[in-house]
Amino acid sequence: MTHTLTAPTATRGLVEITGVRKSFGATEVLKGVSLTVEPGGVAVIVGPSGSGKSTLLRTINHLEKVDGGHITIDGQLVGYEIRGDRLHELREKDILKQRTEIGMVFQNFNLFPHLTALENVSEAPVVAQGRSKEEARRRGLELLDRVGLKDRAGAYPRQLSGGQQQRIAIARALALDPKILLFDEPTSALDPELVNEVLDVIRGLAKSGTTLIIVTHEMGFARDVADTVVFMDQGQIVEQGTPQDIFSNPQEPRTRSFFSKVLEPAFNI
Amino acid sequence: MSSAATKVAQSQEPQPAPAAEALPEPVDVPPAGAPPRQAPDYSSYRVVAARHPWRWVGTAVVAIGVLAVAWSLATNPRWEWGVVTQWFTAQSVVHGLVETLKLTAISGILGFVLGFILALMRLSASPLLVSVSWTFSWIFRSTPLLVQMLLWYNLGYLYEKISLGIPFTDVRFFEVQTTTLISQFAAAVLGLTLNQAAYSAEIIRGGILSVDQGQLEAAAALGIPAWRRSTRIVLPQAMRAILPTAFNEIIGLVKGTSIVYVLAYSELFYTVQVIYNRTQQVLPLLLVATLWYIVITSVLSVFQYYIERHYSKGAVRNLPLTPLQKARKFFATHAAVPTRRNI
Ligand SMILES: Nc1ncnc2c1ncn2[C@@H]1O[C@H](COP(=O)(O)OP(=O)(O)OP(=O)(O)O)[C@@H](O)[C@H]1O
Ligand SMILES: [Mg+2]
């Protein structure tokens, strides 16, 4: 893998997913998924609809409880703690604390519509991390500046375009200074001409030393930004490797047939 | 069309959008290769606002109707306006009014607080809490308020004494005669509050359910604590759905308090009843009560308007104008109409 490309300061944000299983009723959605993302690494998860990509992301910040296997971040179990020979589920308070280290960006933004852009960004640092209002405000403006929306700080989400809303959502996730950022199809609710403004922001983050785990259907972007591409199908990781390996030289027939459907011929050099 | 329109808009003062539509349709885009045509300059034209003749006809018809009603109210001697004014601010009536307001405020506030708790119980994960809350609403929504009222007042018949102690033992900290504890006022408040709680629980629950699940998820993902999630994220959004119905309930409650006349409790309605039984001026005194109810409802409606406006922040792209702003806008635009008409 190409660790040398990531920022040398990346020492936090190691994600280790080991044998994770998850069922909804009778259907098993994750069938023993294992994946390691190095600190500061960028993993892009691709795969057909219903393959369990979103579910996997949601288990990483314990929005979804796993039925088997475990997930650690920098060696610390997510959602549980070890006492003797048992795993005790963490109390709500501790789970919330863990979540402040894991930012999440949703497909449909989920901005709080009754709060302004700046209030959206500065709410969590105050109530979840106990920072002062003034500090959160200052940092919020800084982050809005970083996503190019400082001048819209007072706007409500419904007064913003989809691309702008998603950039605010990214700023909101960054406000907690997370080790890890999870993106669930951050551009698929956007018009084509708005996609790039969001992808550009994520590209900038990829160089910042934060670990990124991104579910996307934007294959060009995946090739560009990922150091690991993970192909999932039917609740399993079928194949993973560098973008070069996966896109140009897939080993598994399932991977090949998926890419032959989604990749533009011109892209498949 | 669009390119020409953009040029027009750039070349003149900012204008209300409809004006652009009133402009003549520009000529088709020239065929490729032809020299670019000069965009026509419309900046010297005057803008004439669109006319709505039927709106004016409708306004006139309604105005005539309103005038006719007002005329008959003012001139028909049987309304006995003299009697109405005489009693409108009489001490006993004002006293009754205060009692009505007191009952409404106390049982409205307690009812909504209890309703909020019941709504949270109903939405909780505990089956016991859910069923207790459900049963409460079921019972109080299915018994007539009148019956509830009489039951509370006659509680002394069912339970002679009320005591506070450790259940299933003989330890008692405190014991009173039920009849001394349940006064008319207590029975009235109890009946109105519990009944109100049953209804407001459903209203609040509906409001909470109307908030998108993604909002809670996003808040949880940001590590925002549960209590704060409810108060800062969910409730302000739920308020938009809750408020209109909640005000309906409060306004209903104002008049609903008149039901406590069965307890001979001297609120507004009971007071005027007592008076007209004595003076036989039935209609004018009912009018007195009605006018007061109208006043209360009007004041509440103004509150409702501004509270709803407060909670619509961010939910609508642009806040609606207040009546004051609307009036100003109306006069600003319509004052100029006659001169335009003369063109
Ligand atoms: N809460 C749930 N209850 C029941 N089934 C669920 C639930 N959430 C997801 N599933 C099922 O789990 C499977 C995987 O869903 P998931 O959302 O992880 O897919 P995905 O790979 O993200 O798909 P897409 O690309 O369409 O977003 C689907 O078959 C879905 O129907
Ligand atoms: Mg998904």
Image: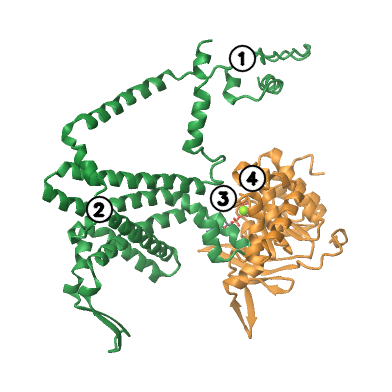
Quarter-wise, where is residue B8 in the image? top right
* Dot 4 beta carbon under 8 Å from ligand 2: no
Specify whether disc 2 shares its chain with disc 3.
no
The color scheme shown is: by chain
Badge 3: how crowded within 10 Å, few (<14), some, or many (20+)? many
How far, Cα to Cα, is label 4 from label 1?
Answer: 36 Å
Question: Which of the two marks, 4 or 1, is nearer to us in this view?
Answer: 4
Dot 1 alpha-carbon crowd within 10 angstroms: few under 14, some 14 to 19, many 20 or more: few
Q: Quadrant of residue B176?
A: bottom left
In the rendered picture, chain B carries what hue?
Answer: green
Residue B91, numbered circle: 2
- Which chain letter matches label 4? A
Q: CA distance from mark 2 to mark 1?
A: 70 Å
Q: Colour of chain A?
A: orange
Up/down of A190 relative to A72, above or below: above
Q: Nearer the viewer, residue A105 or B81?
A: B81
Quadrant containing ligand 1 reads bottom right
Task: Tell me, for residue A79, which label it has, or none.
Answer: none
Q: Secondary structure at mark 2?
A: helix
Q: Chain of mark 1?
A: B
Residue B215 in picture, x, y percent from top left: 56, 55
Which quarter of the rendering shows the C terminus of chain B?
top right
Q: Report helix, strand or loop for mark 1.
A: loop
The residue that disc 1 covers is: B25
Q: CA distance from mark 2 to mark 3?
A: 47 Å
Q: Amino acid at mark 3?
A: His
